Image: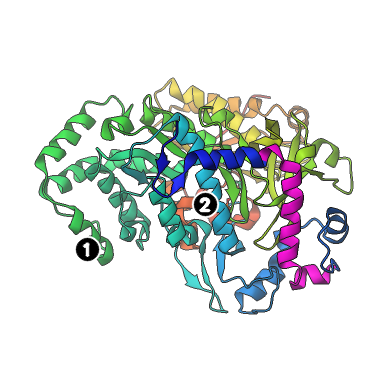
Amino acid sequence: MLEKMEGIDLNRVIEEFEAMTRDAGRVQKETLKRILDENGNCEYLLNLGLDGRTDLESFRACCPIITHKDLEYYIQRIADGDSIPILTGRPITTISLSSGTTQGKPKYVPFNDELLDTTMQIFQTSFAFRNRDYPIEGGKALQFIYSSKQFKTKGGLAAGTATTNLFRSSQYKSTMKAMQSQSCSPDEVIFGPNFHESLYCHLLCGLLYREEVQFVSSTFAHSIVHAFRTFELVWEELCHVIRCGELTSRITAPCIQAAMSKLLKADPALADLIHKKCSGLINWYGLIPELFPNAKYIYGIMTGSMEPYLKKLRHYAGGLPLLSADYGASEGWIGANVNPELPPELATFAVLPNIGYFEFIPLKECTDMLEPKPVGLTEVKVGQEYEILITNSAGFYRYRLGDVVKVVGFHNSTPELQFICRGNLLLTINIDKNTEKDLQLAVEAAANLLAEDKRELVDFTSHVDLSKEPGHYVIFWEINGEASDDRLKECCNCLDRSFVDAGYVSSRKVELIAPLELRVLRRGTFQKILDHFLELGAAVSQFKTPRCVGPSNDAVLQILSGNVVKSYFSSAF
Ligand code: AMP
């Protein structure tokens, strides 16, 4: 039996989800009607001639399928302070910045209370299922969450990343409290002006509350791995801080200093214990349960571009389960993970039929069709891949999110999706087609060879080099420690061979694509890339390493090029 937590009845959350998903088709219809009713008077829908109609046929006939580019003009006017109903019936008061790691710069996205409500709904839904299988017992969560820089747009609207807007809301805080998932770090740490100082203090707070920590989490798994990699470097200093009860000069922000000094007191026994535990570990295996003996699981988005971090995360986690979080975007949420017991590689997301109207463009058919013909939520087929379209209360109508998902089953009558990859092809020179997933698989295969030398891949990205004819793929690697030339040559050949797409293989054979190049980066290069995105206003909480760096991402390309220490060309073909 699920306990009734203070303020939320988890059994009821599950019952409501079950009822709604049993009738997903009807709920979708009603949801579309509600969205169009509430927003029918906005300029965007009026211009399209929808004229207050709320039925599916009129909606499809009037509203074209769009991308973010089509909305830029409208969003810019909102940001500039035009307060008439533009994309939504009610005015937008906050702007979110999406991570923008693909394009090189953050995108503006409207943020409103409806988005906040659906976020809470999805968090509660997955928590109810999670807590049924992995109950937590009250206490705290060690959450590696951070805010971005916030600023005012020309029109005076608050702008920051979606997660920052979320973490700042009182609704988020009360929901987290009701879910016993309150962060063990004070707000001053979460909203601190400097990410490195916040991370250091998150670790410190985690250690101070080590007995109470029930789970360790972040929005995207990358932040957890990054945090414990940092722990490896600063653990002795952290022990020293705990021993004497005083922060080091590393923490300069007065607000963080003040908040932390309230928590810190000299605790030599705790410092000794942590020191002993860390000293006893072999290559940091099982660090997380060792530090946090009552932690029940590790939680965060672990799918898609986060999968490459799973190996390291499992290493730190020892035997603790890794539970993958929900699926959504700054533009809106899509599905909840209601099967928390599945390993992250198999995680699925059950679409919540009342948080938006969803359409799916079948990918197989789409390649030979000029006009994509999307199908509705309950018309999708198991085994088929789709690109997802969102219509929701935040001003998006038939909006291409850009993600590819696969339907792997149904929960009642709502589909369970697996995230496949971003839709745009990453690597293509002529007839070759390689996606983020293809790159990930190739890198995984080659990085396994590094393990033989006890080296590990810290992170990776790619680039298509067209500066000489014929063009070639470049894969950038940052490695923990030195690998031998022979090993790296072997890795380079393995990468080249692991792109099994027929277009790539045939082009390589006839030299229409030149040999793949592996460029090894100086240690810390990916940290520099992260810092670069933070400068642009991104937040670590939403950071995703760009898996392919195109020409529009010039600044990142320069960071990469300036930090290459070795390069190898494949002789695989
Ligand atoms: P953002 O642009 O920062 O709002 O990030 C949204 C994007 O992150 C989505 O469009 C997906 O590509 C990715 N994403 C979000 N949730 C997941 C998930 N559960 N699994 C994989 N990728 C995800």
- Residue 382 is inside the magenta segment: no
Q: Is residue 243 left or right of residue 102?
A: left
Q: Percent from the top left, x then y, of residue 30?
A: 74, 52
Vertical placement of 285 versus 327: above or below?
A: above
Residue assigned mark 2? 120
Q: Give left or right: position of 71 versus 297.
A: right
Q: For the point 68% across and 68% down, which residue is it? A: 88
Horizontally, residue 101 falls left or right of residue 245, namely right
N-terminal of the pair, mark 2 or mark 1, is 2
**Is the residue marked 2 within 8 Å of ligand 1, measured from its CB?**
no
Q: Main secondary structure of the magenta part?
A: helix
Q: Amino acid at mark 2?
A: Met
Instruction: Inspect this view and state whether residue 520 appears.
Output: no
Q: Is residue 41 shown above or below 467?
A: below
- The one nearer the camera, 563 or 499, is 499
Residue type at mark 1 is: Ala
Q: Which residue is the site of mark 1?
A: 258
